[in-house]
Image (tube, coloured by chain):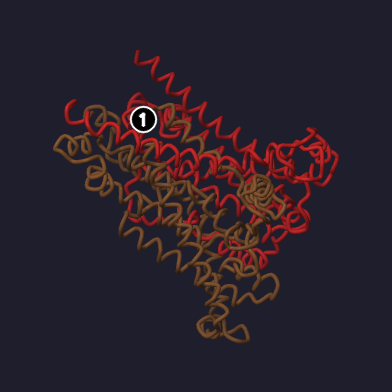
Amino acid sequence: MSLSSASPQPRINAGRSALWLLAGLTMLFLLAPIAVIIVVSFNDTTLFSFPPTRWSLRWYQALWESRAWREAGWFSLWLASLVALASLLIGVPAAYGLAKGRFPGRRLAEALLISPMVVPVIVLALGLYMLFSKLGLIGTPTSLFLAHTLLALPVVIVIVGAAFRRLDGSIELAARSCGASFPRAFWHIVLPAIRPALISAGAFAFLTSFDEVVLTLFLGGPRTTTLPKKIWESVKFELDPSLTAVSTILIIVSIAALLLVEVARRSRIQRLAKEVL
Amino acid sequence: MTLVAASAVPSVKAARAWRARPGLMIAGALAFCAIVYLLPMLSLFGWAFQGPSGTGASLAQLSRLIGDDTYHYAFFTTFKIAAITTLICALIGYPYAYLMATTGPRLAMLLTAAVMIPFWTSVLARSLAWMILLGRKGIVNEWLTGWGLLERPAALLFNSIGVQIGMVHVLLPFMVLPIWSILSRLDPGLPRAARSLGASPAAAFIHVTLPLSLPGLAAGATLVFMFAIGFYITPALLGGPDDLTIASLIEMVVRDLLDWPFGAMLSLALLGLVALVFACGAAFAGAGRIAGMEGR
C-alpha cells in the first residue's frame, strides 16, 4: 500500500491544490456579493464605493426614521412568524403521517404535498391570483399568509419527515406500552426527540416567507408591503443606498436563522454524546 | 422488540386505530393543499381553455402559443439560460462537492457554510449585490479598469452575462448539495481498491468515483435546470430587454396586457416543461433523490 501510493503522491497533491484553488474561487464567488453588500451599507456617501472611504450608520438611521420601512419590517416579521407557526401546525402531523403511516395513496399524497416546491413560483402566483380575486382576497394579509404557508409547508414536511424516518419507532412504542395515549406519547416523547428538526423547519419556514417576493408582488396590495416587496419597488425605481442596509438586515436574519439551526443540532449531538459516555 | 410491540397494542382494534391515525394526520395538510394549491392550478386550466365568451372550451390560446414566433423566442431564451446555468453549475459544483466530501471535518464545515449561507440568503438581496458589483460604474469595473486590466468598463449588467452570473450564484447550491450527499456516503475503500490494483488517481476517479456519483450529478442538474426555467427575480433584475424569459413573459402578459387566458396558457406550458424535466431527471436519478432536496 505504502509502496503503490508513494510514487503518484506529488501528482495527487498537484491535483488537490488545483481543486482547492477552484474551490477557493467558488467560495469567493459565493460569499463576495454578500460581504460586499454588508460592507457597502456602512458607507457614508451615496456612492457604492468599496471599501468605503468613510464609515457611518446613516442608511440604517434613514431606514429607522422612515415610517414606511419600519412598517414593512414589522409586517414581514409578523407574517413570517405566523407562516412558520401555521406550517409547523399542519406540516408536522402530515410529516408524521407520511413517515409512519401505511395507507393506500401515501406516495401520491407525499408527492402532492412536496410538489409546490418545484412548481415555478410565477405559476403558483398566477393561479392564486385567479382564485383569490374571485374570493376578494387580493391585497389582504390573509392572501399572503395562505400563499406563503403553501411554500413553507413542503420545507417543513421534508425536514421533519426526514427526522421522523430516522427516529427509532421503539421509543414511541415503549411510551405507548407504558400506558401513554397516542397524543400524549406524540407530545411528550416523539416531538421532543426531534426538537432540532422542529427548530430548523420553523426557521426555514420563517425565512421562506421573510424573503419571498413573487407571490407578494402578485397577491399583495398597499396594505401588505413586506421588506422584499419594498426593496423590489425601490430597485425598479433607483438604486438607493438604504437598500443596501435593508439587504444587510435580510442577510443577518438569514445567518441568525442558520446559526440557530446549527446550535440546536449541536446541542443535541453533545447531549447524545454525554448520554452515551 | 416483538415483545414490546405485542404488549403495546393490547387489542386488534387498538392496533388498527394506531396504524390508521398516521394516515389521518395528513388530512389537515391535504385539505389546505386542495384549496390553496389544487384549486388555483385548476383555475389555470379553466382560464387557459376557456371559450371566447367565457363559456365552453377552446384551444384558441394554445394555437396562439404555437403560432407566434415572439413566444418561441422567450422559450428559446429560457432554455439557453437554463442550459448554460446547468453546465456552469456542474463544472464548478462537482469539484467543490468532491472536496466537501473528501476533506477533513473543519474544512468541510467551511465549504458547507459557504454554500449554505447564500442558499438561505434572500435572492433579492443577492441580486441587488450583483447590481452594485457589476454595474458600469460598479465595483468590478472600477477595479478592473483601475488595475489596467480593462481600458473601458465592460457591460456586465442588464445583459445575458449579468443573468448568467446571478443564476449560477442562486442555483449552484442545488448542484453542490446532491452531489455532496452521494459522494459523502460513497465507500472510500472503493477508489482506494482501484488504486491498490494499479489504477492512477485519474483512472480511479473516472472509472470508480465518477460513475458512482452520476445519480447525484443527474439530480443536481435536474434541480438546477428545473428551477432555472421557472426563475423570475434574477433575469428580471439583472437581464436586459433581450433576456425575456417565459416567467417574465407571463408577468408581462398578465400585469401589462391583462390577458389572463394567455397568461394561464403560458403558465401551463411552463409547468409542463418543468414536469418533463423532472420526469427525465427522475428516470436517471430517481424521484426521491431530487425531491429530497429542500429549497426554494
Q: Pointer 1: what residue?
A: A172
> Few, some or many C-alpha atoms within 10 Å of disc 1 (few <14, some 14-19, many ≥20)?
many
Asked if one can make out residue A145 in the rendered structure from this viewpoint, the answer is no
User: Which chain gets the red colouring?
Assistant: A
Residue ID at (23%, 42%): B204
Q: Residue A255 in the image: x percent, y percent?
A: 59, 35
> Where, by quadrant of the figure, is residue A76 drawn?
top right
Image quadrant containing the C terminus of chain A: top left
| Labels in figure, total | 1
Q: Residue A245 in the image: x percent, y percent?
A: 74, 40
Seen from this angle, which residue lies furthest left? B197
User: Which chain gets the brown colouring?
Assistant: B
Q: Residue A257 in the image: x percent, y percent?
A: 58, 34
Seen from this angle, which residue lies furthest top? A277
Q: Is residue A224 left or right of residue B15?
A: right
Residue ID at (37%, 43%): A99
* In this view, A55 is above or below A32: above
Residue ID at (38%, 57%): A108
Q: Residue B111 in the image: x percent, y percent?
A: 46, 35
Residue nearest the observer in this picture, A137 or B216 = B216
Q: Is residue B258 left or right of residue B105?
A: right
The chain ID associated with circle 1 is A
